[in-house]
Amino acid sequence: MINILPTPSFKIALSVFSLTLLASCGNDEPAKLSEQGLIPMPVSVTASDSLFELTENTDIYVSQGSEESQKVGQYLADKLNPSTGLGLEVKATDAAPAAGNIYLTLTAADTTLGDEGYELNISTQGVTLTAHQPAGLFRGIQTLRQALPADVEKADKQSGSWKIPTGTIRDFPTYAYRGAMLDVARHFFSVDDVKRYIDLIAAYKMNVLHLHLSDDQGWRIEIKSWPKLTSFGSKSEVGGGEGGFYTQEQYKDLVKYALDRYIMIVPEIDMPGHTNAALAAYPELNCNEKDPNPKPYSGIEVGFSTLCTSKEITYKFVDDVMRELAALTPGPYLHMGGDESHVTPMEDYIPFVERVQDIIQSHGKQMIGWDEVTNAKLKTNSIAQYWAKAEYAQSAAKQGAKLIMSPAKYAYLDMQYDSTTKYGLHWAAYIEIDSAYNWEPSTMVPGVTQADILGIEAPMWTETIVDMDALEYMAFPRLLGIAEIGWSPKSARNWEDYRRRLGQQGKRMEAMGIGYYPSKQIEWGK
Ligand code: TNX
Protein backbone atom coordinates (compact mmCIF):
# COMPACT_ATOMS: atom_id res chain seq x y z
CA MET A 1 0.00 0.00 0.00
CA ILE A 2 1.29 3.45 -0.80
CA ASN A 3 0.89 5.78 2.07
CA ILE A 4 1.58 9.40 1.32
CA LEU A 5 0.28 11.55 4.12
CA PRO A 6 0.48 15.33 3.85
CA THR A 7 0.75 16.84 7.31
CA PRO A 8 -1.38 19.81 8.46
CA SER A 9 1.67 22.05 8.24
CA PHE A 10 2.00 21.17 4.57
CA LYS A 11 1.00 24.63 3.28
CA ILE A 12 3.38 26.50 5.55
CA ALA A 13 6.12 24.05 4.72
CA LEU A 14 5.40 24.49 1.04
CA SER A 15 5.86 28.25 1.19
CA VAL A 16 9.08 27.92 3.20
CA PHE A 17 10.12 25.39 0.65
CA SER A 18 9.44 27.72 -2.29
CA LEU A 19 11.44 30.46 -0.60
CA THR A 20 14.35 28.13 -0.13
CA LEU A 21 14.03 27.18 -3.76
CA LEU A 22 14.48 30.79 -4.79
CA ALA A 23 17.47 31.17 -2.53
CA SER A 24 19.20 27.95 -3.45
CA CYS A 25 22.20 27.48 -5.66
CA GLY A 26 24.07 24.38 -6.86
CA ASN A 27 21.94 21.25 -6.53
CA ASP A 28 18.21 21.80 -6.70
CA GLU A 29 16.33 21.71 -3.43
CA PRO A 30 14.83 18.26 -3.20
CA ALA A 31 11.17 17.52 -3.72
CA LYS A 32 9.27 15.75 -0.96
CA LEU A 33 10.36 12.18 -0.35
CA SER A 34 7.19 10.97 -2.06
CA GLU A 35 8.04 12.99 -5.17
CA GLN A 36 11.64 11.94 -5.56
CA GLY A 37 11.04 9.65 -8.52
CA LEU A 38 12.11 6.51 -6.72
CA ILE A 39 12.44 3.36 -8.88
CA PRO A 40 11.45 0.72 -7.98
CA MET A 41 8.51 2.31 -6.17
CA PRO A 42 8.69 1.36 -2.46
CA VAL A 43 5.88 -0.45 -0.67
CA SER A 44 5.19 2.57 1.52
CA VAL A 45 6.46 6.15 1.57
CA THR A 46 5.41 8.59 4.29
CA ALA A 47 6.79 12.04 3.58
CA SER A 48 7.24 14.79 6.14
CA ASP A 49 8.24 18.31 5.20
CA SER A 50 11.76 18.87 6.39
CA LEU A 51 15.24 18.20 5.16
CA PHE A 52 18.34 16.49 6.44
CA GLU A 53 21.62 17.75 5.07
CA LEU A 54 24.84 15.76 4.79
CA THR A 55 27.78 17.85 6.00
CA GLU A 56 31.45 17.47 6.65
CA ASN A 57 30.56 16.21 10.11
CA THR A 58 28.39 13.39 8.79
CA ASP A 59 29.68 9.83 9.08
CA ILE A 60 28.18 6.39 8.49
CA TYR A 61 27.76 4.37 11.67
CA VAL A 62 27.14 0.63 11.54
CA SER A 63 26.30 -1.82 14.29
CA GLN A 64 29.41 -3.19 15.94
CA GLY A 65 30.41 -6.75 15.06
CA SER A 66 28.63 -7.01 11.71
CA GLU A 67 31.34 -7.24 9.12
CA GLU A 68 28.73 -7.40 6.37
CA SER A 69 27.01 -4.21 7.53
CA GLN A 70 30.44 -2.61 7.63
CA LYS A 71 30.89 -3.53 3.95
CA VAL A 72 27.48 -2.13 3.05
CA GLY A 73 28.43 1.07 4.85
CA GLN A 74 31.63 1.21 2.86
CA TYR A 75 29.74 0.69 -0.42
CA LEU A 76 27.59 3.69 0.49
CA ALA A 77 30.63 5.79 1.45
CA ASP A 78 32.34 4.88 -1.82
CA LYS A 79 29.26 5.98 -3.77
CA LEU A 80 28.81 9.29 -1.90
CA ASN A 81 32.34 10.48 -1.27
CA PRO A 82 33.63 11.18 -4.80
CA SER A 83 30.75 13.53 -5.70
CA THR A 84 30.06 15.11 -2.31
CA GLY A 85 33.68 15.39 -1.23
CA LEU A 86 32.39 15.10 2.34
CA GLY A 87 34.77 12.30 3.34
CA LEU A 88 32.10 10.20 5.07
CA GLU A 89 33.79 7.57 7.21
CA VAL A 90 32.39 4.21 8.23
CA LYS A 91 32.47 3.74 12.00
CA ALA A 92 31.34 0.85 14.21
CA THR A 93 29.06 1.63 17.12
CA ASP A 94 26.98 -0.20 19.73
CA ALA A 95 24.37 2.54 20.10
CA ALA A 96 22.57 5.03 17.87
CA PRO A 97 25.00 7.80 16.91
CA ALA A 98 24.67 11.50 17.71
CA ALA A 99 22.50 13.71 15.49
CA GLY A 100 23.78 14.49 12.02
CA ASN A 101 24.83 10.98 10.98
CA ILE A 102 23.73 7.99 8.93
CA TYR A 103 23.12 4.83 10.96
CA LEU A 104 22.85 1.33 9.44
CA THR A 105 21.49 -1.19 11.88
CA LEU A 106 20.18 -4.76 11.90
CA THR A 107 17.13 -5.79 13.85
CA ALA A 108 16.56 -9.38 14.88
CA ALA A 109 13.00 -8.54 15.92
CA ASP A 110 11.47 -7.21 12.71
CA THR A 111 11.28 -10.43 10.72
CA THR A 112 8.47 -9.02 8.55
CA LEU A 113 11.14 -7.19 6.55
CA GLY A 114 12.40 -10.56 5.27
CA ASP A 115 15.83 -11.02 3.73
CA GLU A 116 15.82 -7.92 1.55
CA GLY A 117 13.38 -5.53 3.19
CA TYR A 118 14.39 -2.38 5.02
CA GLU A 119 13.02 0.63 6.80
CA LEU A 120 14.55 4.02 6.04
CA ASN A 121 13.86 6.85 8.46
CA ILE A 122 15.06 10.29 7.47
CA SER A 123 14.56 13.05 10.03
CA THR A 124 16.15 16.41 10.61
CA GLN A 125 18.35 14.55 13.09
CA GLY A 126 19.81 12.07 10.65
CA VAL A 127 19.20 8.89 8.69
CA THR A 128 18.50 5.49 10.22
CA LEU A 129 18.34 2.46 7.97
CA THR A 130 17.10 -0.72 9.62
CA ALA A 131 16.97 -4.19 8.12
CA HIS A 132 16.59 -7.76 9.25
CA GLN A 133 19.53 -8.88 7.09
CA PRO A 134 22.55 -7.13 5.55
CA ALA A 135 20.98 -7.65 2.10
CA GLY A 136 18.13 -5.41 3.28
CA LEU A 137 20.64 -2.72 4.25
CA PHE A 138 22.16 -3.00 0.79
CA ARG A 139 18.76 -2.59 -0.92
CA GLY A 140 17.99 0.31 1.44
CA ILE A 141 21.12 2.27 0.55
CA GLN A 142 20.02 2.20 -3.09
CA THR A 143 16.90 4.07 -2.01
CA LEU A 144 18.99 6.51 0.00
CA ARG A 145 21.11 7.23 -3.11
CA GLN A 146 17.94 8.05 -5.02
CA ALA A 147 16.73 10.35 -2.23
CA LEU A 148 19.85 12.51 -2.72
CA PRO A 149 20.32 14.96 -5.62
CA ALA A 150 21.15 13.21 -8.92
CA ASP A 151 24.62 14.76 -8.95
CA VAL A 152 25.56 12.43 -6.12
CA GLU A 153 26.02 9.76 -8.81
CA LYS A 154 28.77 11.67 -10.58
CA ALA A 155 32.30 10.37 -10.36
CA ASP A 156 33.95 13.70 -9.54
CA LYS A 157 33.42 16.38 -6.95
CA GLN A 158 30.31 18.52 -7.37
CA SER A 159 29.43 21.81 -5.76
CA GLY A 160 26.12 22.26 -3.98
CA SER A 161 24.44 20.99 -0.89
CA TRP A 162 23.40 17.41 -0.13
CA LYS A 163 19.90 17.54 1.26
CA ILE A 164 17.52 14.63 1.69
CA PRO A 165 13.79 15.13 2.21
CA THR A 166 12.52 13.65 5.46
CA GLY A 167 10.08 10.81 5.91
CA THR A 168 9.86 7.08 6.33
CA ILE A 169 10.05 4.31 3.76
CA ARG A 170 9.18 0.73 4.53
CA ASP A 171 9.94 -1.59 1.69
CA PHE A 172 10.43 -5.20 0.63
CA PRO A 173 10.29 -7.08 -2.68
CA THR A 174 7.30 -8.82 -4.24
CA TYR A 175 9.38 -11.48 -6.02
CA ALA A 176 12.40 -13.29 -4.58
CA TYR A 177 14.17 -13.57 -7.97
CA ARG A 178 14.75 -10.36 -9.91
CA GLY A 179 17.25 -10.87 -12.65
CA ALA A 180 19.05 -9.61 -15.69
CA MET A 181 20.62 -12.00 -18.18
CA LEU A 182 23.69 -11.21 -20.22
CA ASP A 183 24.67 -13.28 -23.25
CA VAL A 184 28.48 -13.22 -23.24
CA ALA A 185 28.60 -15.96 -25.91
CA ARG A 186 27.42 -14.11 -29.04
CA HIS A 187 29.72 -11.23 -28.13
CA PHE A 188 32.17 -11.54 -25.28
CA PHE A 189 32.09 -8.96 -22.48
CA SER A 190 35.14 -8.43 -20.25
CA VAL A 191 35.21 -8.89 -16.47
CA ASP A 192 35.15 -5.10 -16.04
CA ASP A 193 32.13 -4.75 -18.33
CA VAL A 194 30.25 -7.39 -16.38
CA LYS A 195 31.18 -5.67 -13.10
CA ARG A 196 29.76 -2.40 -14.39
CA TYR A 197 26.53 -4.13 -15.38
CA ILE A 198 26.36 -5.69 -11.90
CA ASP A 199 26.66 -2.26 -10.26
CA LEU A 200 24.00 -0.83 -12.55
CA ILE A 201 21.45 -3.58 -11.91
CA ALA A 202 22.24 -3.40 -8.17
CA ALA A 203 21.18 0.26 -8.17
CA TYR A 204 17.65 -0.87 -9.06
CA LYS A 205 17.56 -3.67 -6.47
CA MET A 206 17.93 -6.60 -8.86
CA ASN A 207 19.45 -9.66 -7.21
CA VAL A 208 20.38 -12.07 -10.02
CA LEU A 209 22.77 -11.90 -12.94
CA HIS A 210 22.26 -14.86 -15.26
CA LEU A 211 25.29 -15.34 -17.52
CA HIS A 212 24.67 -17.16 -20.80
CA LEU A 213 28.15 -18.70 -20.96
CA SER A 214 28.05 -20.86 -24.07
CA ASP A 215 26.38 -20.91 -27.43
CA ASP A 216 27.07 -21.84 -31.04
CA GLN A 217 29.43 -18.88 -31.41
CA GLY A 218 31.66 -19.39 -28.38
CA TRP A 219 32.38 -21.06 -25.03
CA ARG A 220 33.21 -18.51 -22.32
CA ILE A 221 34.09 -20.34 -19.08
CA GLU A 222 37.23 -22.36 -18.38
CA ILE A 223 36.43 -26.04 -17.75
CA LYS A 224 39.63 -27.69 -16.56
CA SER A 225 38.64 -31.24 -17.52
CA TRP A 226 37.77 -30.21 -21.10
CA PRO A 227 40.44 -27.59 -21.92
CA LYS A 228 39.72 -27.27 -25.65
CA LEU A 229 36.33 -25.73 -24.84
CA THR A 230 38.22 -22.51 -24.23
CA SER A 231 41.59 -23.02 -25.98
CA PHE A 232 39.63 -23.64 -29.20
CA GLY A 233 35.97 -22.97 -28.52
CA SER A 234 36.29 -19.45 -27.06
CA LYS A 235 38.06 -17.85 -30.01
CA SER A 236 35.02 -16.94 -32.05
CA GLU A 237 31.98 -14.69 -31.78
CA VAL A 238 29.28 -13.15 -33.97
CA GLY A 239 30.81 -11.15 -36.79
CA GLY A 240 34.22 -12.82 -36.64
CA GLY A 241 35.73 -11.08 -33.59
CA GLU A 242 38.26 -12.78 -31.35
CA GLY A 243 35.86 -13.86 -28.60
CA GLY A 244 37.29 -14.55 -25.16
CA PHE A 245 36.55 -16.43 -21.94
CA TYR A 246 36.73 -16.16 -18.15
CA THR A 247 39.30 -18.24 -16.32
CA GLN A 248 37.90 -19.92 -13.23
CA GLU A 249 39.80 -17.36 -11.12
CA GLN A 250 38.20 -14.47 -13.01
CA TYR A 251 34.81 -16.10 -12.74
CA LYS A 252 35.22 -16.54 -8.96
CA ASP A 253 36.11 -12.87 -8.76
CA LEU A 254 32.88 -12.01 -10.60
CA VAL A 255 30.85 -14.26 -8.30
CA LYS A 256 32.34 -12.52 -5.27
CA TYR A 257 31.87 -9.06 -6.74
CA ALA A 258 28.20 -9.86 -7.33
CA LEU A 259 27.75 -11.42 -3.88
CA ASP A 260 29.18 -8.29 -2.26
CA ARG A 261 26.21 -6.55 -3.88
CA TYR A 262 23.79 -9.33 -2.79
CA ILE A 263 23.50 -10.52 -6.37
CA MET A 264 23.68 -14.19 -7.24
CA ILE A 265 25.22 -15.29 -10.51
CA VAL A 266 23.32 -18.05 -12.33
CA PRO A 267 25.60 -19.72 -14.89
CA GLU A 268 24.06 -21.16 -18.03
CA ILE A 269 25.56 -23.77 -20.30
CA ASP A 270 23.07 -24.17 -23.13
CA MET A 271 22.39 -27.75 -24.33
CA PRO A 272 21.68 -29.96 -26.22
CA GLY A 273 21.28 -27.26 -28.91
CA HIS A 274 23.29 -24.03 -29.14
CA THR A 275 26.43 -26.17 -28.81
CA ASN A 276 28.40 -25.61 -32.00
CA ALA A 277 31.41 -24.18 -30.10
CA ALA A 278 31.68 -27.31 -27.93
CA LEU A 279 31.04 -29.61 -30.90
CA ALA A 280 33.80 -27.92 -32.89
CA ALA A 281 36.25 -28.23 -29.97
CA TYR A 282 35.40 -31.90 -29.29
CA PRO A 283 34.18 -33.72 -32.44
CA GLU A 284 33.45 -36.84 -30.35
CA LEU A 285 30.40 -35.03 -28.93
CA ASN A 286 28.80 -35.14 -32.44
CA CYS A 287 26.80 -38.20 -33.50
CA ASN A 288 28.88 -38.42 -36.61
CA GLU A 289 32.39 -37.25 -35.82
CA LYS A 290 33.42 -36.62 -39.39
CA ASP A 291 30.35 -35.54 -41.28
CA PRO A 292 29.79 -32.75 -40.66
CA ASN A 293 32.73 -31.71 -38.55
CA PRO A 294 31.59 -28.32 -37.24
CA LYS A 295 33.75 -25.24 -37.66
CA PRO A 296 33.73 -22.15 -35.43
CA TYR A 297 30.56 -20.21 -36.18
CA SER A 298 30.12 -16.46 -36.37
CA GLY A 299 26.61 -16.12 -37.82
CA ILE A 300 23.34 -15.59 -35.95
CA GLU A 301 21.17 -18.51 -37.04
CA VAL A 302 19.84 -20.68 -34.22
CA GLY A 303 18.76 -24.29 -33.91
CA PHE A 304 21.26 -26.17 -36.11
CA SER A 305 23.51 -27.86 -33.55
CA THR A 306 23.02 -30.67 -31.03
CA LEU A 307 25.07 -32.74 -28.66
CA CYS A 308 24.78 -36.44 -29.50
CA THR A 309 22.22 -37.55 -26.93
CA SER A 310 22.78 -41.27 -27.58
CA LYS A 311 26.50 -41.32 -26.71
CA GLU A 312 27.73 -41.94 -23.17
CA ILE A 313 30.59 -39.49 -23.61
CA THR A 314 27.99 -36.70 -23.84
CA TYR A 315 26.88 -37.41 -20.27
CA LYS A 316 30.48 -37.63 -19.05
CA PHE A 317 30.94 -34.18 -20.62
CA VAL A 318 27.78 -32.77 -19.01
CA ASP A 319 28.73 -34.27 -15.64
CA ASP A 320 32.23 -32.78 -15.74
CA VAL A 321 31.00 -29.35 -16.81
CA MET A 322 28.22 -29.25 -14.20
CA ARG A 323 30.58 -30.48 -11.45
CA GLU A 324 33.10 -27.73 -12.17
CA LEU A 325 30.36 -25.11 -12.46
CA ALA A 326 28.70 -26.26 -9.23
CA ALA A 327 32.03 -25.84 -7.44
CA LEU A 328 32.21 -22.24 -8.68
CA THR A 329 28.61 -21.46 -7.75
CA PRO A 330 27.56 -20.63 -4.18
CA GLY A 331 23.93 -20.10 -5.30
CA PRO A 332 21.42 -22.94 -5.70
CA TYR A 333 20.92 -22.89 -9.48
CA LEU A 334 22.60 -24.20 -12.63
CA HIS A 335 20.91 -23.29 -15.93
CA MET A 336 21.04 -25.91 -18.72
CA GLY A 337 19.45 -23.84 -21.50
CA GLY A 338 17.40 -26.40 -23.41
CA ASP A 339 15.95 -23.87 -25.89
CA GLU A 340 15.58 -24.11 -29.64
CA SER A 341 17.02 -27.63 -30.01
CA HIS A 342 15.43 -27.88 -33.43
CA VAL A 343 17.66 -30.71 -34.68
CA THR A 344 17.27 -32.90 -31.59
CA PRO A 345 14.25 -35.21 -32.08
CA MET A 346 11.76 -34.81 -29.19
CA GLU A 347 12.16 -38.50 -28.28
CA ASP A 348 15.86 -37.80 -27.67
CA TYR A 349 15.41 -34.35 -26.16
CA ILE A 350 13.14 -35.48 -23.31
CA PRO A 351 15.40 -38.19 -21.81
CA PHE A 352 18.39 -35.89 -22.30
CA VAL A 353 16.81 -33.11 -20.22
CA GLU A 354 15.77 -35.58 -17.53
CA ARG A 355 19.29 -36.99 -17.31
CA VAL A 356 20.87 -33.53 -17.16
CA GLN A 357 18.40 -32.65 -14.41
CA ASP A 358 19.63 -35.69 -12.42
CA ILE A 359 23.25 -34.71 -13.03
CA ILE A 360 22.63 -31.18 -11.78
CA GLN A 361 20.88 -32.52 -8.69
CA SER A 362 23.74 -34.94 -8.06
CA HIS A 363 25.98 -31.88 -7.70
CA GLY A 364 23.64 -30.40 -5.11
CA LYS A 365 22.01 -27.82 -7.39
CA GLN A 366 18.58 -27.13 -8.87
CA MET A 367 18.06 -27.03 -12.62
CA ILE A 368 16.75 -24.03 -14.51
CA GLY A 369 15.88 -24.44 -18.18
CA TRP A 370 14.15 -22.35 -20.89
CA ASP A 371 10.45 -23.17 -21.17
CA GLU A 372 10.91 -26.03 -23.69
CA VAL A 373 12.32 -28.19 -20.85
CA THR A 374 8.73 -28.60 -19.62
CA ASN A 375 8.41 -31.24 -22.36
CA ALA A 376 10.37 -33.40 -19.91
CA LYS A 377 9.29 -34.52 -16.46
CA LEU A 378 10.47 -31.81 -14.11
CA LYS A 379 11.34 -32.22 -10.45
CA THR A 380 9.33 -29.85 -8.31
CA ASN A 381 12.45 -27.93 -7.35
CA SER A 382 13.44 -27.38 -10.98
CA ILE A 383 12.57 -24.07 -12.59
CA ALA A 384 11.31 -23.23 -16.07
CA GLN A 385 12.09 -19.87 -17.63
CA TYR A 386 9.09 -18.72 -19.66
CA TRP A 387 10.04 -16.81 -22.79
CA ALA A 388 7.63 -17.76 -25.54
CA LYS A 389 5.01 -20.48 -25.16
CA ALA A 390 2.12 -20.18 -22.71
CA GLU A 391 1.46 -23.93 -22.75
CA TYR A 392 5.00 -24.57 -21.53
CA ALA A 393 4.50 -22.16 -18.63
CA GLN A 394 1.22 -23.93 -17.82
CA SER A 395 2.96 -27.29 -17.95
CA ALA A 396 5.59 -26.09 -15.46
CA ALA A 397 2.89 -24.93 -13.06
CA LYS A 398 0.99 -28.23 -13.46
CA GLN A 399 4.17 -30.15 -12.69
CA GLY A 400 4.71 -28.08 -9.55
CA ALA A 401 7.87 -26.43 -10.89
CA LYS A 402 8.29 -22.69 -10.35
CA LEU A 403 8.64 -20.17 -13.16
CA ILE A 404 10.88 -17.27 -14.04
CA MET A 405 8.93 -14.92 -16.29
CA SER A 406 10.87 -13.48 -19.24
CA PRO A 407 8.21 -12.86 -21.90
CA ALA A 408 10.15 -12.02 -25.07
CA LYS A 409 7.50 -9.53 -26.19
CA TYR A 410 8.00 -7.36 -23.11
CA ALA A 411 11.15 -8.30 -21.23
CA TYR A 412 13.74 -8.91 -23.97
CA LEU A 413 16.21 -6.08 -23.82
CA ASP A 414 17.68 -6.98 -27.22
CA MET A 415 14.40 -6.12 -28.95
CA GLN A 416 14.45 -2.78 -30.77
CA TYR A 417 12.46 0.14 -29.35
CA ASP A 418 11.10 0.90 -32.82
CA SER A 419 12.06 0.40 -36.46
CA THR A 420 14.74 3.10 -36.25
CA THR A 421 16.70 1.64 -33.31
CA LYS A 422 20.30 1.17 -34.40
CA TYR A 423 20.90 -2.07 -32.50
CA GLY A 424 18.82 -5.11 -31.74
CA LEU A 425 16.35 -7.52 -33.30
CA HIS A 426 12.58 -7.39 -33.56
CA TRP A 427 11.42 -10.96 -34.03
CA ALA A 428 9.31 -10.83 -30.84
CA ALA A 429 8.21 -7.18 -30.92
CA TYR A 430 9.29 -3.59 -30.92
CA ILE A 431 9.38 -2.75 -27.23
CA GLU A 432 8.95 0.88 -26.24
CA ILE A 433 9.17 1.99 -22.60
CA ASP A 434 5.45 1.54 -21.99
CA SER A 435 5.33 -2.05 -23.25
CA ALA A 436 8.43 -3.00 -21.25
CA TYR A 437 6.61 -1.67 -18.16
CA ASN A 438 2.96 -2.54 -18.72
CA TRP A 439 2.94 -6.27 -18.11
CA GLU A 440 2.07 -8.22 -15.05
CA PRO A 441 3.74 -11.58 -14.39
CA SER A 442 0.88 -13.03 -12.35
CA THR A 443 -1.79 -12.50 -15.02
CA MET A 444 0.34 -13.07 -18.12
CA VAL A 445 -0.47 -16.75 -18.65
CA PRO A 446 -3.90 -18.17 -17.76
CA GLY A 447 -3.45 -20.79 -15.05
CA VAL A 448 -0.12 -19.39 -13.84
CA THR A 449 -0.52 -17.42 -10.62
CA GLN A 450 1.85 -15.43 -8.44
CA ALA A 451 2.40 -18.51 -6.26
CA ASP A 452 3.85 -20.34 -9.29
CA ILE A 453 6.32 -17.57 -10.01
CA LEU A 454 9.77 -17.32 -8.50
CA GLY A 455 10.43 -14.04 -10.22
CA ILE A 456 11.27 -12.22 -13.41
CA GLU A 457 14.26 -11.74 -15.64
CA ALA A 458 15.26 -9.37 -18.45
CA PRO A 459 17.49 -11.14 -20.98
CA MET A 460 20.03 -9.29 -23.12
CA TRP A 461 20.97 -11.40 -26.13
CA THR A 462 23.99 -9.98 -27.86
CA GLU A 463 23.93 -10.96 -31.53
CA THR A 464 23.85 -7.23 -32.38
CA ILE A 465 25.21 -5.84 -29.12
CA VAL A 466 28.96 -5.47 -29.48
CA ASP A 467 29.99 -3.24 -26.58
CA MET A 468 28.88 -1.48 -23.40
CA ASP A 469 27.52 1.54 -25.27
CA ALA A 470 25.11 -0.66 -27.20
CA LEU A 471 24.30 -2.72 -24.13
CA GLU A 472 23.46 0.31 -21.99
CA TYR A 473 21.40 1.91 -24.76
CA MET A 474 19.28 -1.22 -25.03
CA ALA A 475 19.05 -2.01 -21.29
CA PHE A 476 18.31 1.53 -20.15
CA PRO A 477 15.80 2.70 -19.37
CA ARG A 478 13.75 -0.48 -19.91
CA LEU A 479 15.59 -2.37 -17.19
CA LEU A 480 14.25 0.05 -14.56
CA GLY A 481 10.69 -0.89 -15.47
CA ILE A 482 11.42 -4.59 -15.25
CA ALA A 483 13.19 -4.06 -11.92
CA GLU A 484 10.04 -2.33 -10.66
CA ILE A 485 7.79 -5.17 -11.88
CA GLY A 486 9.91 -7.58 -9.85
CA TRP A 487 10.18 -5.46 -6.71
CA SER A 488 7.09 -3.29 -6.28
CA PRO A 489 3.63 -4.52 -5.37
CA LYS A 490 1.21 -4.64 -8.29
CA SER A 491 -0.99 -2.10 -6.51
CA ALA A 492 1.87 0.44 -6.43
CA ARG A 493 2.49 0.31 -10.16
CA ASN A 494 0.90 2.60 -12.67
CA TRP A 495 2.18 3.85 -15.99
CA GLU A 496 1.51 7.58 -15.56
CA ASP A 497 3.23 7.68 -12.20
CA TYR A 498 6.08 5.53 -13.48
CA ARG A 499 6.48 7.81 -16.48
CA ARG A 500 6.92 10.80 -14.20
CA ARG A 501 9.40 8.99 -11.96
CA LEU A 502 11.38 7.70 -14.94
CA GLY A 503 11.64 11.26 -16.25
CA GLN A 504 13.30 12.20 -12.98
CA GLN A 505 15.68 9.25 -13.25
CA GLY A 506 17.09 10.62 -16.52
CA LYS A 507 19.66 12.90 -14.95
CA ARG A 508 20.53 10.19 -12.42
CA MET A 509 21.29 7.73 -15.24
CA GLU A 510 23.26 10.46 -16.99
CA ALA A 511 25.23 11.11 -13.81
CA MET A 512 26.06 7.40 -13.70
CA GLY A 513 27.40 7.72 -17.23
CA ILE A 514 24.66 5.53 -18.71
CA GLY A 515 24.05 6.24 -22.39
CA TYR A 516 20.33 5.45 -22.24
CA TYR A 517 17.69 5.63 -24.98
CA PRO A 518 15.94 9.00 -24.60
CA SER A 519 12.47 7.78 -25.48
CA LYS A 520 9.95 10.39 -26.63
CA GLN A 521 7.38 8.75 -24.39
CA ILE A 522 9.09 10.33 -21.39
CA GLU A 523 9.57 13.96 -20.37
CA TRP A 524 13.15 13.81 -19.24
CA GLY A 525 14.04 16.05 -16.30
CA LYS A 526 16.79 18.59 -16.85
C1 TNX B 1 15.94 -16.57 -28.88
S1 TNX B 1 15.19 -16.76 -26.05
C2 TNX B 1 16.90 -17.26 -28.17
C3 TNX B 1 18.29 -16.83 -28.25
C4 TNX B 1 18.46 -15.64 -29.15
C5 TNX B 1 17.34 -14.68 -28.95
C6 TNX B 1 17.48 -13.40 -29.71
C7 TNX B 1 15.91 -18.05 -26.18
C8 TNX B 1 15.74 -18.97 -25.09
N1 TNX B 1 16.63 -18.28 -27.29
O1 TNX B 1 19.12 -17.87 -28.65
O2 TNX B 1 19.68 -15.04 -28.84
O3 TNX B 1 16.15 -15.30 -29.32
O4 TNX B 1 16.51 -12.49 -29.36
Image: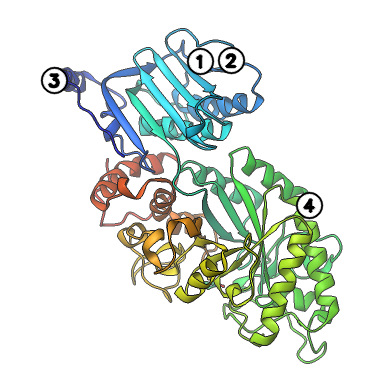
Q: Is residue 388 above or below residue 329?
A: below
SS for dot 4: helix
Viewer-proximal residue among 389 and 185: 389
Whether residue 510 is visible to the viewer of this picture, yes or no, is: yes
Give percent across and percent down for residue 139: 49, 36
Residue at the spot of label 1: 59
* Left or right: 507 as drawn, with respect to 376: left
SS for dot 1: loop
Give percent across and percent down for residue 145: 43, 32
The residue located at (59%, 40%) in the rendering is: 262
The residue located at (56%, 17%) in the rendering is: 89
- Give the spatial CA distance, label 4 vs label 1: 39 Å
Residue at the spot of label 2: 91
Residue at the spot of label 3: 15
- Give the spatial CA distance, label 1 vs label 3: 31 Å
Q: Is residue 152 above or below residue 524?
A: above
